[in-house]
Image (spheres, helix red, strand yellow):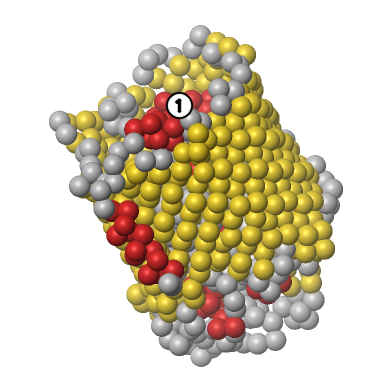
Amino acid sequence: MSFVKWYLFMVVVLVQGFAQASELDDLINDFNNKNALSKKTIDENKGHLVLYSRDKLERMHAKTLKDVFKTTPVLYYHENRYAQPDPLTSGAFEPYRSNFIRMYIDGVEVTQGWMGSGIVLYGDINIDFVDHIEFYYMTPSFETTTEPAYLTIFLYSKEAERDSGGAVSLATGSRGTNTQTVSYGDKKEAFSYMVNLSHTDAKREKIPNGTSRPLSRDFERTQLFSYIKSENQTFHLQVLKKNMDSLAGLSLDATPLVSEIDYLNLHVDYSITFWEHWKAQFAYEYLDSEIRQEDDNPFSFGSTFLGKKLYTKGKNSTVNTELTYKNTLGNHRITTGVKYRMKGIDSYETIDTSTETNIAVIPLNFDNESIVSLFFQDQYRLKENQLLTLGLEYNNITRNGGVSDDELFQVRLGYLYSGEKWSYKTYLYRSMFALEPFGRYLHLEFTNSVKPQVTRGITQEIAYKSENAYTRLTALYMQDKNGLLENNHAGDTKYFFGIFNYNYRFDVNNMMDLQLYYAHYKDIGNLNKLEDYSGYVSFSNSYENWSIYNGVVWHQNSIDNKNYFDLTSSISWEASRNLTFTLKGDNLLNKAKTTKLFRIDPLTGGNLKPFDISPIDQLIMLEVEYRF
């Protein structure tokens, strides 16, 4: 029996007369962190959790996702040569690389479809609307994602009932950077609603490049987040407009005459729970982009294929639909369903097609990719405080234009134990990843021969919780076959991560967070071995109407054996119940981790010395917040 037939057979069988089992539901809930609103969303079966609660975000005075992302282990914040958030970038001339990181807002994925992961635009968004953030490492539960991931990020918005009323925030800082945010939420009878609007004019540090035109990463962003919710229905509307200077862009030697990208992104989703166990969800993404690139040399060495000027406009859209069924049968908690995702280029044009600039555009023979996913998950109660979990997912990917299709199969087996003080978690998994559409579009001549990546791994996590402290050790090992991130899609990289967490609460107003990790990579890119040692420690203290936060992110790796330190400090004064002043400094030592930006001599093709650029600006901001 094929997997699809087996899957449909299981659905028919399981839908027949499932009975509720409250004891199993209680057990599953016991695995979830009882932390304010997050207790409703945390699902320990999604992976290995790094939680940023409402309290922690407020103590950090985190205003953007970048403020949080830079402190995470193993996969942390980077920007590529186009100044886009791209944690997996190598700094070389390549398409977007962080498609293995998926992002969700209130449980709905935000994705740019053709371009890839939603991180490309949302990786540094304003998070004033966010209540808490969950990072889940390694293969997620298959009820979560249409496409596989190394890391899934969940942002959950504030509840209008808890945060009813309005708030206005004004901030100004170094180099003229400024941000304005206004939000309002309320609950009316059976419905609640929230609207959050923010505007950021970021004047970022310039990067000297030996010309009178230093590289620029300035951007202006307007962001709208809104929702309407009832007990069984949710509707989101999100709009993000970003006009940005795109750093080096397509310039081989990083000396562009013009390097700019403008984005307009629309996200709409609607979900409804019906007939007690069924949930349907629909989401639509639209992205309008305009790219302006000019250089005094051709963008490709030894060829005038791309010329010296590239002005393009493009529109792409993504449609996501999902139907999920959840129920309990005895000791089994079953989740199953079907998902459909369609990614397409709606239009693509060159603005300037003069022969002088010698512009060429790859033909749009391939402009559509569709993914059908069938998934099944069973959480089985072994004993009072133990769960065995099994997840299966089948992905069928079809493409037009004569580009080859793919079939992917994912499987994950896990065991979870939750005691009064001790807890343990382990997963054994096999995942498959297909080359993303944009990468295929740029290299149609060989992508039919690119096999899906196969990743196998095992993870272990053990934790101990006392009255004032929480200690956890996590170990992860995995291996890629036909790796898409390295060695021209033929990598065989091995990964090992060890993460240690220790959180101590001295009292209700004073606490410490410590995180250390070690990562070992074998055969990654052009390196036989790469080792990474990093850590994060923070102290947050409150006294009467004052609160102080100090946090340091430390990085070192075997490439240069250099220590990088990113010191963030803030002090906040609550002048009244409604009025708060905050002074915050980022990268105060100006020694934060850098990302290499590789360069090529456009005349000889030889390698030039790369630039080391930190994605974390040295920045001091003063913020005033008024709540009404």
Residue 46 visible within the image: no
Q: Residue furthest left?
A: 189
Residue 191: image location, x then y, percent: 19, 36
**Which residue is rendered at x = 38% and y = 48% of the image?**
334
- The residue closer to the viewer here, 121 or 293, is 121
Q: Residue furthest bottom?
A: 355
Q: Badge 1: how crowded within 10 Å, few (<14), some, or many (20+)?
A: few
Q: Residue furthest top?
A: 544
Residue 540: image location, x then y, percent: 60, 21
Left or right, 95 with reference to 337 = right
**Which residue is rendered at x = 78% and y = 81% of the image?**
604
Query: Where, by quadrant of the figure, is residue 605 drawn?
Result: bottom right
**Which residue is rendered at x = 43% and y = 72% of the image?**
1
Q: Is residue 602 above or below residue 121?
A: below
Q: Is residue 150 above or below residue 368?
A: above
The amino acid type found where label 1 is placed reads Lys
Q: Quadrant of the C terminus?
A: top left
Query: Where, by quadrant of the figure, is residue 175 drawn?
Result: top right
**Which residue is rendered at x = 58% and y = 12% of the image?**
507
Element type where label 1 sits in the image: loop
Residue 605 visible within the image: yes
> What number of labels is visible?
1
Please name the residue that numbered disc 1 is placed on.
Answer: 34
- The residue closer to the viewer here, 536 or 335, is 335
Query: Where, by quadrant of the figure, is residue 302 drawn?
Result: bottom right
- The residue closer to the viewer here, 321 or 509, is 321
Left or right, 492 with reference to 354 = right
Residue 148: image location, x then y, percent: 51, 59
Residue 582: image location, x then y, percent: 51, 25
- The residue closer to the viewer here, 225 or 572, is 225
